[in-house]
Image (spheres, grey):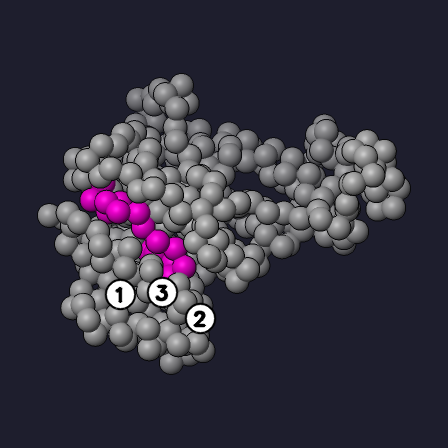
Protein backbone atom coordinates (compact mmCIF):
# COMPACT_ATOMS: atom_id res chain seq x y z
CA UNK A 1 0.00 0.00 0.00
CA UNK A 2 1.20 3.51 -0.79
CA UNK A 3 1.95 5.94 2.03
CA UNK A 4 0.37 9.34 2.49
CA UNK A 5 0.98 12.03 5.10
CA UNK A 6 -1.92 14.27 6.12
CA UNK A 7 -1.23 17.67 7.68
CA UNK A 8 -4.14 19.22 9.62
CA UNK A 9 -3.60 22.84 10.72
CA UNK A 10 -6.05 23.82 13.45
CA UNK A 11 -6.80 27.25 14.89
CA UNK A 12 -9.80 27.40 17.23
CA UNK A 13 -11.55 24.57 15.38
CA UNK A 14 -11.62 22.07 18.24
CA UNK A 15 -15.33 21.43 17.65
CA UNK A 16 -14.56 20.18 14.12
CA UNK A 17 -11.21 18.51 14.74
CA UNK A 18 -12.47 15.11 15.92
CA UNK A 19 -14.75 14.35 12.93
CA UNK A 20 -12.03 15.62 10.57
CA UNK A 21 -9.39 13.30 12.04
CA UNK A 22 -11.78 10.36 12.25
CA UNK A 23 -12.63 10.75 8.56
CA UNK A 24 -8.91 10.20 7.89
CA UNK A 25 -8.37 7.35 10.35
CA UNK A 26 -11.17 5.31 8.77
CA UNK A 27 -9.51 5.44 5.32
CA UNK A 28 -8.49 2.05 3.93
CA UNK A 29 -5.95 0.86 1.37
CA UNK A 30 -3.17 3.28 2.36
CA UNK A 31 -0.47 3.65 5.00
CA UNK A 32 -1.11 7.01 6.62
CA UNK A 33 0.27 9.39 9.20
CA UNK A 34 -1.43 12.50 10.57
CA UNK A 35 0.16 15.64 11.95
CA UNK A 36 -2.17 18.01 13.80
CA UNK A 37 -0.63 21.46 14.20
CA UNK A 38 -2.37 23.59 16.81
CA UNK A 39 -1.61 27.15 15.79
CA UNK A 40 -1.81 28.58 19.35
CA UNK A 41 -5.57 28.08 19.61
CA UNK A 42 -7.45 29.68 22.50
CA UNK A 43 -10.13 26.96 22.60
CA UNK A 44 -9.73 23.33 23.73
CA UNK A 45 -7.83 22.22 20.62
CA UNK A 46 -4.83 21.03 22.73
CA UNK A 47 -7.08 18.72 24.76
CA UNK A 48 -8.93 17.32 21.74
CA UNK A 49 -5.72 16.91 19.74
CA UNK A 50 -3.92 15.33 22.67
CA UNK A 51 -6.72 12.83 23.23
CA UNK A 52 -6.71 11.86 19.54
CA UNK A 53 -2.92 11.47 19.45
CA UNK A 54 -2.96 9.48 22.67
CA UNK A 55 -5.19 6.75 21.30
CA UNK A 56 -3.64 6.25 17.84
CA UNK A 57 0.08 6.00 17.11
CA UNK A 58 -0.46 7.30 13.59
CA UNK A 59 -1.29 10.76 14.95
CA UNK A 60 1.24 13.34 16.11
CA UNK A 61 0.37 16.70 17.71
CA UNK A 62 2.37 19.90 17.64
CA UNK A 63 1.44 23.19 19.26
CA UNK A 64 2.82 26.56 18.17
CA UNK A 65 3.65 28.80 21.12
CA UNK A 66 2.36 31.78 19.14
CA UNK A 67 0.02 32.06 16.19
CA UNK A 68 1.93 31.77 12.90
CA UNK A 69 -1.00 31.90 10.50
CA UNK A 70 -2.20 29.32 8.01
CA UNK A 71 0.57 29.64 5.41
CA UNK A 72 3.48 29.23 7.82
CA UNK A 73 1.67 26.42 9.65
CA UNK A 74 0.90 24.61 6.40
CA UNK A 75 4.52 24.87 5.24
CA UNK A 76 5.72 23.56 8.60
CA UNK A 77 3.79 20.37 8.01
CA UNK A 78 4.01 19.91 4.25
CA UNK A 79 7.61 21.04 3.72
CA UNK A 80 9.31 20.12 7.01
CA UNK A 81 7.41 17.06 8.24
CA UNK A 82 5.82 15.17 5.31
CA UNK A 83 8.04 12.40 3.88
CA UNK A 84 5.53 9.93 2.43
CA UNK A 85 5.09 9.45 -1.30
CA UNK A 86 1.92 11.54 -1.22
CA UNK A 87 0.64 14.34 1.01
CA UNK A 88 -2.58 16.18 1.75
CA UNK A 89 -3.20 19.49 3.50
CA UNK A 90 -6.58 19.17 5.20
CA UNK A 91 -8.32 21.96 7.09
CA UNK A 92 -9.56 20.95 10.54
CA UNK A 93 -13.13 21.93 9.65
CA UNK A 94 -13.26 19.77 6.50
CA UNK A 95 -13.44 15.99 6.10
CA UNK A 96 -12.85 13.10 3.69
CA UNK A 97 -15.33 10.61 2.30
CA UNK A 98 -14.68 6.87 2.82
CA UNK A 99 -12.19 5.52 0.29
CA UNK A 100 -11.05 8.97 -0.84
CA UNK A 101 -7.34 8.40 -0.20
CA UNK A 102 -7.32 4.92 -1.72
CA UNK A 103 -8.89 6.27 -4.91
CA UNK A 104 -6.45 9.18 -5.06
CA UNK A 105 -3.26 7.14 -4.59
CA UNK A 106 -4.51 4.42 -6.94
CA UNK A 107 -4.72 6.98 -9.75
CA UNK A 108 -1.33 8.48 -8.94
CA UNK A 109 0.33 5.07 -8.59
CA UNK A 110 -0.85 4.23 -12.10
CA UNK A 111 0.19 7.57 -13.62
CA UNK A 112 3.69 8.74 -12.72
CA UNK A 113 3.17 11.89 -14.82
CA UNK A 114 0.40 13.10 -12.47
CA UNK A 115 1.55 15.58 -9.83
CA UNK A 116 -1.82 16.16 -8.17
CA UNK A 117 -5.21 14.51 -8.02
CA UNK A 118 -8.48 15.95 -6.77
CA UNK A 119 -12.15 15.05 -6.76
CA UNK A 120 -15.57 16.46 -6.09
CA UNK A 121 -16.67 17.88 -2.71
CA UNK A 122 -19.97 18.57 -1.00
CA UNK A 123 -20.58 21.82 0.85
CA UNK A 124 -21.56 21.26 4.48
CA UNK A 125 -22.52 23.68 7.24
CA UNK A 126 -21.88 23.89 11.00
CA UNK A 127 -24.48 21.24 11.72
CA UNK A 128 -23.18 18.91 8.97
CA UNK A 129 -26.14 19.56 6.70
CA UNK A 130 -25.02 18.79 3.17
CA UNK A 131 -23.47 15.44 4.08
CA UNK A 132 -24.18 12.91 1.34
CA UNK A 133 -24.04 9.14 0.93
CA UNK A 134 -20.52 7.90 0.48
CA UNK A 135 -19.48 6.51 -2.93
CA UNK A 136 -18.31 2.98 -3.62
CA UNK A 137 -14.51 2.82 -3.42
CA UNK A 138 -14.11 0.14 -6.08
CA UNK A 139 -15.95 1.92 -8.88
CA UNK A 140 -15.04 5.42 -10.06
CA UNK A 141 -13.95 7.22 -13.17
CA UNK A 142 -11.23 9.80 -13.62
CA UNK A 143 -9.53 11.83 -16.31
CA UNK A 144 -5.99 13.05 -16.76
CA UNK A 145 -5.78 16.75 -17.61
CA UNK A 146 -2.57 17.95 -19.30
CA UNK A 147 -0.87 20.52 -17.09
CA UNK A 148 -1.18 23.22 -19.75
CA UNK A 149 -4.90 22.54 -20.09
CA UNK A 150 -5.30 22.98 -16.34
CA UNK A 151 -3.43 26.30 -16.46
CA UNK A 152 -5.71 27.52 -19.22
CA UNK A 153 -8.80 26.45 -17.25
CA UNK A 154 -7.66 28.38 -14.17
CA UNK A 155 -6.94 31.53 -16.18
CA UNK A 156 -10.23 31.40 -18.05
CA UNK A 157 -12.57 30.21 -15.26
CA UNK A 158 -10.49 30.14 -12.04
CA UNK A 159 -9.87 26.98 -10.04
CA UNK A 160 -12.55 24.37 -9.49
CA UNK A 161 -10.42 22.34 -7.08
CA UNK A 162 -11.96 21.53 -3.67
CA UNK A 163 -9.09 21.97 -1.23
CA UNK A 164 -9.84 18.94 1.02
CA UNK A 165 -9.51 16.61 -1.96
CA UNK A 166 -6.18 17.83 -3.43
CA UNK A 167 -3.52 15.14 -2.94
CA UNK A 168 0.02 16.10 -4.04
CA UNK A 169 3.07 14.07 -4.96
CA UNK A 170 5.38 14.97 -2.05
CA UNK A 171 8.67 14.85 -3.97
CA UNK A 172 7.30 17.35 -6.49
CA UNK A 173 5.88 19.52 -3.71
CA UNK A 174 9.29 19.69 -2.01
CA UNK A 175 11.05 20.40 -5.28
CA UNK A 176 8.92 23.40 -6.24
CA UNK A 177 8.67 24.86 -2.73
CA UNK A 178 6.00 25.73 -0.20
CA UNK A 179 2.97 27.99 -0.11
CA UNK A 180 3.59 31.71 -0.64
CA UNK A 181 2.82 34.01 2.32
CA UNK A 182 2.26 36.92 -0.05
CA UNK A 183 -0.91 35.24 -1.39
CA UNK A 184 -2.89 34.43 1.77
CA UNK A 185 -6.23 34.03 0.00
CA UNK A 186 -5.09 32.15 -3.10
CA UNK A 187 -1.87 30.38 -2.12
CA UNK A 188 -3.50 27.00 -2.74
CA UNK A 189 -4.40 27.91 -6.33
CA UNK A 190 -0.90 29.26 -6.92
CA UNK A 191 0.46 25.91 -5.74
CA UNK A 192 -1.86 23.94 -8.03
CA UNK A 193 -0.87 26.10 -11.00
CA UNK A 194 2.80 25.67 -10.09
CA UNK A 195 2.33 21.90 -10.04
CA UNK A 196 0.62 22.09 -13.45
CA UNK A 197 3.74 23.67 -14.96
CA UNK A 198 5.59 20.50 -13.95
CA UNK A 199 3.08 17.66 -14.28
CA UNK A 200 -0.42 16.61 -15.28
CA UNK A 201 -3.49 16.82 -13.04
CA UNK A 202 -5.93 13.95 -12.43
CA UNK A 203 -9.60 14.54 -11.67
CA UNK A 204 -11.78 11.94 -9.96
CA UNK A 205 -15.46 12.18 -10.81
CA UNK A 206 -16.52 11.03 -7.35
CA UNK A 207 -17.29 12.67 -4.03
CA UNK A 208 -13.91 12.82 -2.28
CA UNK A 209 -14.43 15.30 0.54
CA UNK A 210 -16.57 17.74 2.48
CA UNK A 211 -15.88 21.48 2.46
CA UNK A 212 -17.38 23.30 5.43
CA UNK A 213 -18.86 26.76 4.91
CA UNK A 214 -19.79 28.43 8.17
CA UNK A 215 -19.84 31.71 10.05
CA UNK A 216 -16.22 31.44 11.22
CA UNK A 217 -14.80 30.12 7.97
CA UNK A 218 -11.44 31.67 7.11
CA UNK A 219 -12.68 32.30 3.56
CA UNK A 220 -15.18 34.88 4.81
CA UNK A 221 -12.43 37.46 5.10
CA UNK A 222 -12.47 37.87 1.34
CA UNK A 223 -16.00 36.94 0.32
CA UNK A 224 -17.16 39.88 2.44
CA UNK A 225 -14.85 42.24 0.56
CA UNK A 226 -16.48 44.16 -2.27
CA UNK A 227 -13.75 42.91 -4.62
CA UNK A 228 -13.62 39.44 -3.05
CA UNK A 229 -10.28 37.87 -4.00
CA UNK A 230 -10.20 39.06 -7.62
CA UNK A 231 -7.12 41.23 -7.09
CA UNK A 232 -5.26 38.30 -5.59
CA UNK A 233 -6.40 36.00 -8.40
CA UNK A 234 -4.66 38.35 -10.82
CA UNK A 235 -1.50 38.43 -8.68
CA UNK A 236 -1.56 34.63 -8.50
CA UNK A 237 -1.77 34.11 -12.25
CA UNK A 238 0.89 36.75 -12.87
CA UNK A 239 3.20 35.20 -10.25
CA UNK A 240 2.99 31.73 -11.82
CA UNK A 241 3.52 33.14 -15.29
CA UNK A 242 6.58 35.21 -14.36
CA UNK A 243 8.27 32.64 -12.12
CA UNK A 244 7.28 29.35 -13.70
CA UNK A 245 5.46 29.66 -17.01
CA UNK A 246 6.84 32.53 -19.11
CA UNK A 247 8.45 30.00 -21.46
CA UNK A 248 5.14 28.21 -22.08
CA UNK A 249 3.94 29.13 -25.55
CA UNK A 250 0.32 30.14 -24.91
CA UNK A 251 0.43 31.33 -21.31
CA UNK A 252 0.45 35.04 -22.28
CA UNK A 253 -2.81 34.64 -24.20
CA UNK A 254 -4.37 32.86 -21.23
CA UNK A 255 -3.49 35.85 -19.07
CA UNK A 256 -5.49 38.01 -21.48
CA UNK A 257 -8.44 35.64 -20.93
CA UNK A 258 -7.98 36.03 -17.19
CA UNK A 259 -7.94 39.83 -17.41
CA UNK A 260 -11.21 39.86 -19.35
CA UNK A 261 -12.85 37.47 -16.87
CA UNK A 262 -11.64 39.41 -13.86
CA UNK A 263 -12.81 42.74 -15.30
CA UNK A 264 -16.28 41.33 -15.99
CA UNK A 265 -16.55 39.90 -12.49
CA UNK A 266 -15.24 43.10 -10.89
CA UNK A 267 -17.84 45.19 -12.73
CA UNK A 268 -20.59 42.79 -11.69
CA UNK A 269 -19.41 42.97 -8.08
CA UNK A 270 -19.34 46.75 -8.33
CA UNK A 271 -23.04 46.52 -9.14
CA UNK A 272 -23.60 44.34 -6.09
CA UNK A 273 -21.74 46.88 -3.95
CA UNK A 274 -23.87 49.73 -5.34
CA UNK A 275 -27.00 47.73 -4.52
CA UNK A 276 -26.06 47.55 -0.86
CA UNK A 277 -24.96 51.17 -0.69
CA UNK A 278 -21.22 50.47 -0.61
CA UNK A 279 -20.05 53.24 -2.93
CA UNK A 280 -16.43 52.98 -1.83
CA UNK A 281 -16.39 49.23 -2.46
CA UNK A 282 -17.98 49.71 -5.87
CA UNK A 283 -15.31 52.26 -6.75
CA UNK A 284 -12.59 49.78 -5.73
CA UNK A 285 -14.10 47.17 -8.04
CA UNK A 286 -14.35 49.54 -11.00
CA UNK A 287 -10.80 50.82 -10.52
CA UNK A 288 -9.55 47.23 -10.51
CA UNK A 289 -11.49 46.50 -13.72
CA UNK A 290 -9.84 49.55 -15.31
CA UNK A 291 -6.41 48.35 -14.18
CA UNK A 292 -6.64 44.86 -15.66
CA UNK A 293 -8.77 45.68 -18.70
CA UNK A 294 -8.47 49.26 -20.02
CA UNK A 295 -11.20 48.57 -22.60
CA UNK A 296 -13.72 47.87 -19.80
CA UNK A 297 -16.26 50.15 -21.52
CA UNK A 298 -16.83 47.26 -23.94
CA UNK A 299 -18.32 45.20 -21.11
CA UNK A 300 -22.06 45.11 -20.45
CA UNK A 301 -21.39 44.68 -16.73
CA UNK A 302 -19.39 47.93 -16.73
CA UNK A 303 -22.28 49.90 -18.22
CA UNK A 304 -24.73 48.38 -15.75
CA UNK A 305 -22.46 49.45 -12.90
CA UNK A 306 -22.26 52.97 -14.37
CA UNK A 307 -26.05 53.22 -14.49
CA UNK A 308 -26.25 52.19 -10.84
CA UNK A 309 -23.55 54.70 -9.96
CA UNK A 310 -25.42 57.56 -11.62
CA UNK A 311 -28.83 56.52 -10.33
CA UNK A 312 -27.65 55.98 -6.76
CA UNK A 313 -28.86 53.29 -4.33
CA UNK A 314 -32.30 54.85 -3.76
CA UNK A 315 -33.28 55.14 -7.44
CA UNK A 316 -31.71 51.75 -8.17
CA UNK A 317 -33.94 50.26 -5.49
CA UNK A 318 -37.01 51.86 -7.04
CA UNK A 319 -36.09 50.48 -10.46
CA UNK A 320 -35.52 47.01 -9.02
CA UNK A 321 -38.89 47.03 -7.30
CA UNK A 322 -40.57 48.09 -10.52
CA UNK A 323 -38.90 45.22 -12.35
CA UNK A 324 -39.05 42.52 -9.68
CA UNK A 325 -42.05 43.57 -7.66
CA UNK A 326 -42.49 45.07 -4.22
CA UNK A 327 -40.64 42.18 -2.51
CA UNK A 328 -37.23 43.22 -3.83
CA UNK A 329 -35.05 43.71 -0.78
CA UNK A 330 -31.74 45.50 -1.22
CA UNK A 331 -30.72 44.56 2.30
CA UNK A 332 -30.27 40.91 1.31
CA UNK A 333 -27.73 41.60 -1.43
CA UNK A 334 -24.55 39.67 -0.63
CA UNK A 335 -21.85 37.47 -2.11
CA UNK A 336 -22.44 33.83 -1.07
CA UNK A 337 -20.43 31.48 -3.27
CA UNK A 338 -21.30 28.24 -1.45
CA UNK A 339 -24.61 26.66 -0.46
CA UNK A 340 -24.78 23.56 1.80
CA UNK A 341 -25.64 20.44 -0.17
CA UNK A 342 -24.11 21.62 -3.42
CA UNK A 343 -21.35 19.57 -5.03
CA UNK A 344 -18.51 21.43 -6.66
CA UNK A 345 -15.32 20.66 -8.53
CA UNK A 346 -14.31 21.07 -12.17
CA UNK A 347 -14.87 17.88 -14.12
CA UNK A 348 -13.31 18.24 -17.60
CA UNK A 349 -15.74 17.17 -20.28
CA UNK A 350 -14.15 15.40 -23.23
CA UNK A 351 -14.77 18.32 -25.59
CA UNK A 352 -12.84 20.68 -23.28
CA UNK A 353 -9.54 18.98 -24.04
CA UNK A 354 -7.40 20.63 -26.69
CA UNK A 355 -4.56 19.09 -28.62
CA UNK A 356 -1.16 19.71 -27.09
CA UNK A 357 1.30 20.61 -29.82
CA UNK A 358 4.82 19.27 -30.03
CA UNK A 359 6.26 22.64 -29.00
CA UNK A 360 3.95 22.75 -25.99
CA UNK A 361 5.05 19.27 -24.95
CA UNK A 362 8.66 20.31 -25.28
CA UNK A 363 8.04 23.46 -23.24
CA UNK A 364 6.36 21.50 -20.48
CA UNK A 365 9.15 18.93 -20.49
CA UNK A 366 11.65 21.76 -20.14
CA UNK A 367 9.81 23.04 -17.07
CA UNK A 368 10.53 19.97 -14.94
CA UNK A 369 13.18 21.86 -13.01
CA UNK A 370 12.86 25.09 -11.07
CA UNK A 371 12.90 27.87 -13.69
CA UNK A 372 13.97 30.68 -11.38
CA UNK A 373 16.70 29.59 -8.98
CA UNK A 374 16.60 33.01 -7.29
CA UNK A 375 12.95 32.64 -6.41
Left or right of residue 189: residue 364: left
Q: Is residue 116 visible?
A: no
| Residue at (74% x, 31% y) in the render | 297
The label number, if any, that marks residue 12 in the structure image: 2
**Place of residue 56 in the rendered image (x, y in percent of width and height, measured from the top left):** 18, 68
Q: Earlier in the sequence, mark 1 or mark 2?
A: 2
| Residue at (18% x, 64% y) in the render | 58
Mark 2 and 3 residues: CB-CB less than 8 Å, in contact?
no
**Place of residue 235 in the rendered image (x, y in percent of width and height, measured from the top left):** 53, 48
On screen, 53 above or below 164?
Answer: below
On screen, 270 above or below 31?
Answer: above
Residue with the mark numbered 1: 35
**Place of residue 213 in the rendered image (x, y in percent of width and height, measured from the top left):** 49, 53
Number of numbered discs: 3
Q: Earlier in the sequence, mark 1 or mark 3?
A: 3
How many angstroms separate mark 1 from mark 2 (CA)?
Answer: 16 Å
Residue with the mark numbered 3: 17
- Element class at badge 3: helix
Residue stretch rendered in magenta on the structure: 89-103
**Place of residue 278 in the rendered image (x, y in percent of width and height, measured from the top left):** 76, 53
In the rendered image, residue 87 lying in the magenta stretch gets the answer: no
- Element class at badge 1: strand
Amino acid sequence: MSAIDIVIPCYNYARFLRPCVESVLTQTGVHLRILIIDDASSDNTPEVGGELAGRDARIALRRNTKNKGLIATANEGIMDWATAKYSLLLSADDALTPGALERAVKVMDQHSDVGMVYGMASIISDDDSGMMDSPESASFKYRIVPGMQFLKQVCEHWAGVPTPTAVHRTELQHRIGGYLPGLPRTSDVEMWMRIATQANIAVIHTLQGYYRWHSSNMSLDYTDRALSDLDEQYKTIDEVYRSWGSHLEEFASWIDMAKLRLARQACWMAGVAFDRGDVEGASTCLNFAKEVYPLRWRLTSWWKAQVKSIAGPALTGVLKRLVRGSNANLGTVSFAPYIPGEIFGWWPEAQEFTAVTGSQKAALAGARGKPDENR
